Image (spheres, rainbow, N blue to C red):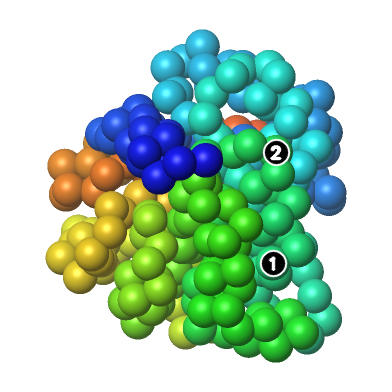
Amino acid sequence: MSEKSWMTMANTFMETVKGQLIISCQALPEEPLHSSFIMARMARAAKMAGAVALRANSVVDVQAIQDETGLPIIGIIKQNYADSKTFITPTIKEMRAIAATGVPVVATQVTGQRRPDNEQLATIVAQFRKEFPETLLMADTATLDNVREADDLGFDIIGTTMHGYTDDTQGLNIADNNFDYLKKVVKAAQHPVIAEGKIDTPAKAAEVLNLGVHAVVVGSAITRPLEIAKGFIAAVAER
């Protein structure tokens, strides 16, 4: 693919999602809705509601959702390895597999933690760029240091996905202290920021866009009924 064609694809995705909601349609193996068929229907509902793009986990889910909706997808593969806490598209193997589906964006975890088989992030990013020069790369970060690393490595998109989910950020939320952390990310990042992680109300989704992020991803609050129901049950139990 020519550089001009790549720029057209990249610009098309970024223009499509600018100032918009991306809905994450995922269900893990232990969840009752774990099924590519169900996730495709969930994605159809998201499209009917007005979502302009989606985020999906696994090759089979991505393919099913592509067939069902035709919407652009941020693709990931969640894969656990015994020797690493990095699990979102953690190795070049998963990056290749998800990119081969034709998604415009592949997201991978950038949290400064050891990668499986001690792969080096800079090395696999460079290799990926050679093999899939037309595919955008999104960094799922947890801290400002992660943001800086992703910028230095030339990631196209900076995500806040892992803030609150790593050892050094456990329990934190990008909405804490009037979105103080997210404001710092927007100020520090040299590439477009997509806000993601624990954005659980429409008001929060609107607010983060007002802070200058490029787009916002919402998942659990929309597409994970088990987690939604748990919240209601907990509130009732504590009344």
Q: Amino acid at mark 2?
A: Thr
Residue, x 48% and y 62% (percent of image)?
140
| Left or right relative to 62: residue 136 | left
| Left or right relative to 140: residue 180 | left
Sequence-earlier tag: 2 or 1: 1
Relative to 96, residue 5 above or below: above
Q: Amino acid at mark 1?
A: Ile
Q: Secondary structure at mark 1?
A: helix
**Percent position (x, y) of residue 146?**
40, 77
Toward the top, the furthest residue is: 48
Residue 229 occupies quadrant: top right
Relative to 181, residue 78 above or below: above
Q: Residues within 10 Å of mark 1 (few under 14, many from 20)?
A: some
Q: Which mark is residue 92?
A: 1
**Percent position (x, y) of residue 154?**
37, 67
- Distance between mark 2 and mark 1 Cα atoms: 15 Å
Kindly identify which residue carries mark 2: 101
Residue 84 occupies quadrant: bottom right
24 or 155, which lies in front? 155
74 or 47, which lies in front? 74
Residue, x 42% and y 17% (percent of image)?
50
| Left or right relative to 130: residue 42 | right
Q: Secondary structure at mark 2?
A: loop
**Percent position (x, y) of residue 134?**
50, 45
Q: Residues within 10 Å of mark 2 (few under 14, many from 20)?
A: some
Is residue 64 in view from this perspective? Answer: yes
Toward the front, the furthest residue is: 2
207 or 79, which lies in front? 79
| Left or right relative to 83: residue 52 | left
Relative to 159, residue 208 above or below: above
Is residue 219 in view from this perspective? Answer: no
Residue, x 45% and y 78% (percent of image)?
169
